[in-house]
Image: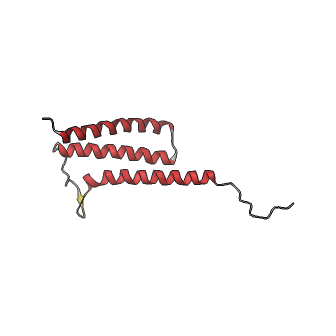
Amino acid sequence: MPDTELIDLGLQLGFSFVASVFALLVWVRNREGAWLWVILGVLTQYVSHLLSLLRYLGLVSKDAIVIAGFSLVGWLPTAVSSLSFCLAFATLWRSLDRRDAPLVVDKSPRKK
């Protein structure tokens, strides 16, 4: 019977690799702030899946780098990926808010 965890990790790595390739292709053509954060999030997500596979295969120890009780190998790529997506949406939200706002707001009463 095939190892389902290995198949799961392989599928996650494969799909995140394809997403990373497309992210790099977008990066070449687009330098908007929100998209750069999305691209960083996708790339760090790929690194996270790669590290999960390497940990499963026994090539990388989860406790390789531990600071204050936190395993950076397991925690850092996931945290950076989530933070990047948060910053992407915040940047996009701010840019959309600015596009919809009028350039000059005239609050003076209109003369007839």
Q: Residue at x 39, y 47 (%)?
A: 41
Q: Residue furthest right?
A: 112
Left or right of 110: which side holds 2? left
- 59 or 112, nearer to the observer: 112
Image position of 34 with respect to 68: above or below:
above
Question: Percent position (x, y) of residue 96?
Answer: 57, 51
Q: Which color mode does the image show? A: secondary structure
Q: Residue furthest left?
A: 1
Instruction: Give the position of the N terminus as an image quadrant.
Output: top left
Question: Percent position (x, y) of residue 10?
Answer: 24, 37
Q: Residue at x 32, y 51 (%)?
A: 78
The answer to which quarter of the image holds residue 105 is bottom right
Left or right of 14: which side holds 41? right
Question: Percent position (x, y) of residue 86?
Answer: 43, 54
Instruction: Give the position of the C terminus as an image quadrant.
Output: bottom right
Question: Percent position (x, y) of residue 100?
Answer: 62, 52
Image position of 108 with respect to 28: above or below:
below
Q: Residue at x 30, y 36 (%)?
A: 14
Image position of 70 with respect to 6: above or below:
below
Question: How many dots with numbers?
Answer: 0
Q: Residue at x 25, y 64 (%)?
A: 68
